[in-house]
Amino acid sequence: EQLGARLVERGHTVSVYCRTNHIRYAGQVYRGMRLVKLPTISNKYLDTMAHTFLSSLHALAQPYDLALYFIVGNSPLTLLPRLRGITTVLNVDGLDWRRAKWPEPAKKYIRWAERVATRVPHAVVTDSRVVERYYRERYGCATTYIPYGSELEPVAPGAALARWGLSPREYILFVGRLVPENCVHHLIGAFEGLNTTKRCVIVGDAPYADQTIAQLKETADPRVIFTGYLFGEGYRELLSHAYAFVETAGEGGTHPALVEAMALGNCVIVHDTPENLETIGRAGLSYDGQRGAPALREALTSLLAAPARAADYGALARARARECFSWEQVTTAYETLFTELRGRSQ
């Protein structure tokens, strides 16, 4: 949304392909972007690939200069627009084969798709230096590093806090998909043994993850609140008033919600993956993901006992987000890459 809208503001024509089983927006244009709504197969293993295949076929008849794809599993499909003379760019996201949700055959496919990604699209984008280094060392592939942006304005306390009976700075927040590799059980387990009157707010959901979500909701701790999906104003309101933001994800590249939490001045505590540590630099805290809930409980206990320390880390996080994760800088990086690629093809 942020990248596309800014490219429109800079004079580019942007089309965004949407899945009809997910999008609820009725219009055909959003923030200047044309929305192309196509069906897919609502299945954990086929949803993304089926939609990307239809989108790629649709793109063949369009006057596009460039096609931007996301997720490494889509790499074989970048061949279709390329054969038609359309420049193709793939943002591979994180190392998807590490995710616990995938069975072994799917992981083998994703590893194969990584190799394809280094050969078929005109350029590969990585959102973290860790993933950039992985592609260089494993495949000898030079990628373009472009992170996510984080220019959110704080939202005053309002309907979202009232809906769940929350007060500013009186809750710990997580935002993300409720899938196994995001390790939300670390936070729930840590909170169940925590001596505090603060609440634990978990924002998110996930398709095809009913069993995982049901297990998470088995907690008997009444302080834990599940909001389900939350977007827009309500999402920004909860980010604006948390005591701390916890990123428990054990896989993936740079997590957008973490970057946005930093931009709004949250003290952040992260699972100590290389990607998460890269994102926060010295502007946040980490816990030992191997130890899980007990390690996170120790970090939270220390932080809850020191409000001034939490505020200091929040200020550091905001400063780092402004320096390293600007949407204008991100848009310029993509625009520069696109211009260079188009120049080579002409």
Image (spheres, rainbow, N blue to C red):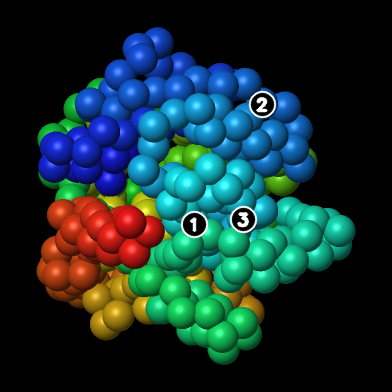
Q: Residues within 10 Å of mark 1 (few under 14, many from 20)?
A: many
**Position above or below: 48 against 317:** above
Residue type (three-letter) at the residue carrying disc 3: Ser
Q: Which mark is residue 160?
A: none
Q: Residues within 10 Å of mark 3 (few under 14, many from 20)?
A: many
Closer to the chain start, of discs 2 and 1, is: 2
Q: Residue 60 in the image: state x and y as whole percent.
A: 53, 33
**Circle 3 is placed at which residue position?**
75
Q: Please tell me which residue is depicted at 37% across the width and 54% down the height of the picture.
A: 256
Q: Is residue 325 left or right of residue 37?
A: left
**Circle 1 is placed at which residue position?**
90
Q: Please tell me which residue is depicted at 39% across the width and 46% down the height of the picture.
A: 66
Look at the image and tell me in which quarter the N terminus lies.
top left
Location of residue 36 (image quadrant): top left
Residue type (three-letter) at the residue carrying disc 1: Leu
Do the CB atoms of the residues marked 3 and 1 lie less than 8 Å apart?
yes
The secondary structure type at the circle numbered 2 is: loop
Q: Nearer the viewer, mark 2 or mark 1?
A: 1
Query: Of residues 148 and 346, which is closer to you in this image?
Result: 346
Do the CB atoms of the residues marked 3 and 2 lie less than 8 Å apart?
no
Q: Please tell me which residue is depicted at 44% across the width and 74% down the height of the picture.
A: 143
Residue type (three-letter) at the residue carrying disc 2: Thr
Q: Residue 117 in the image: state x and y as whole percent.
A: 60, 64
Look at the image and tell me in which quarter the C terminus lies.
bottom left
Q: Please tell me which residue is depicted at 72% across the width and 68% down the height of the picture.
A: 111
The secondary structure type at the circle numbered 1 is: strand
**Circle 2 is placed at which residue position?**
40
